[in-house]
Image (cartoon, helix red, strand yellow):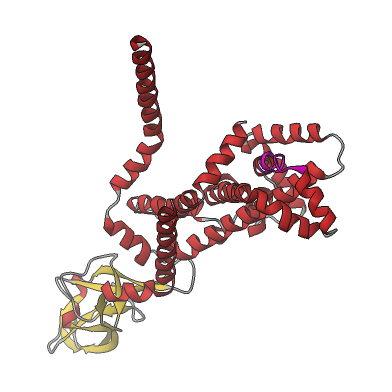
Amino acid sequence: MKKKKTGIRIAAITFFTLLLIGTFFHKKIDGLFCMKVAAVYPQECRVETEPVIELDGEEIPVTTEEVYLSLPAAAVHDGMVFVLETKKVPYGSYEAVFLRAVEVAENAEEVGGDMVYIKDGILRSERVVALFDDRLQDGMRVVEE
Amino acid sequence: MHKKHKKGRLRSVTEGVCLILLSAVYVLPFLWMCGKIRIKDFYLLLIEEFWFYPKYWYSLGIAAAIGTGAAVLSFLAAVGLQWGNIKGKKAILFLVLLLMLMPLQATLLPTYIGLRDMRMLNSPFALILPMLCSPFAFYLMYQYVETVPTEIVEAARLETSSLCKILWHALLPQIKGSVAAVFVFMFAEGFNMVEQPLYFVKEDVLRPLSVIAEEYIQGKEQLLYAVGVLCLIPILLLYAVYEEELSDGMGRLKG
């Protein structure tokens, strides 16, 4: 009987100790197992184009400026990028980072080098996963490096 | 003689089978729940669901406050009724018994009005206060206090005139078991309460785990099994620690 009570007490202490450890360190533990990703902000760039329009049989070059967002080519795969979203989860000061898959295929134009221009789909203020990885999924929680 | 022995054996076997079947009714849902759990669910709940820990501690705190408060209040009330110079003890006991038999839903509205008038709605006190004055806790405690010999109190009175000392040194050691029983029963009731948080508090922050878990686990129903098991553990531990006191308490309530 005494042994049983001692066993129960040990079980209770273990349970609550684990609960306390979890309470204070679960974010760190989570960080050990969550995928780490590097994030980049898209950069705004302006491109001047000179289309030629015909007016009364005369060809006139017109300079227009288009505004694009540029991302590293490694961030885009099959016209898809992953945007990082920080959500404040209920309780405490925790902020978790989730991934949101965004299609940018139709607007992505490779312009040489290792950058691609994207017309829309993402905002300038949104962070994007810098290096596309097959393991990344929509709605997945990650840790930002 | 042989026939009588056989009949008795048959009876005990039938009783045993009936008891096993009855306990299966209670145990099967728990086993079913345990069977549905995957280890991954615990990881998801304990590591990824950030809301779980604060809610768990909050629910434990509320339940502990209810358990402790109800044990203290019912102890004092029972002692007062037993040894106090009160007229109409039987009528009071009858009223308490009546209240005990009433379903919770019948007392929700009066409690709500009382809390509203005291401006305690939407606060943790709205969950704790109504549970402190539990007729069940009082009745259970009274069953114990009734059995304490009057001589002990009389002897203590000769030693000291301090009521606190009499309660603490003479009475409490006699009914330690009942205090434990009331604490465990009320703790379990507080930990599992559902209706009171729904009516008395509006903000999610103030609602305990028993109510809020389902809301937070939208689309991840699998995690509810893990929540269920984790919610069972503190109560199971308390039941295991105070097993004797509880069975004794239920026996007295029956008597």
The one of B155 and B133 positioned closer to us in this rendering: B155
Which residue is outermost to the front? B1
Is residue A86 in sight in this rendering?
Answer: no
Is A97 left or right of B207, judged from the image as shown?
left
Is B125 left or right of B36, judged from the image as shown?
right
Residue A83 percent across, percent down from the top left: 29, 74
Q: Residue visible at 26% across and 72% down?
A: A33
Is B34 left or right of B65, judged from the image as shown?
left
In this view, A52 is above or below A22: below
In this view, A138 is above or below B33: below
State the quadrant of the N terminus of chain B: top left
The verdict on residue B8 being magenta is no
Residue B172 percent across, percent down from the top left: 69, 53
Is A140 left or right of B108, judged from the image as shown?
left
Q: Which residues are magenta?
A: B141-150
The one of B198 and A78 positioned closer to us in this rendering: B198
Q: Main secondary structure of the magenta part?
A: helix
The one of A61 and B70 positioned closer to us in this rendering: B70
Residue B170 percent across, percent down from the top left: 73, 54
The verdict on residue B144 being magenta is yes
Is residue A27 in sight in this rendering?
Answer: yes
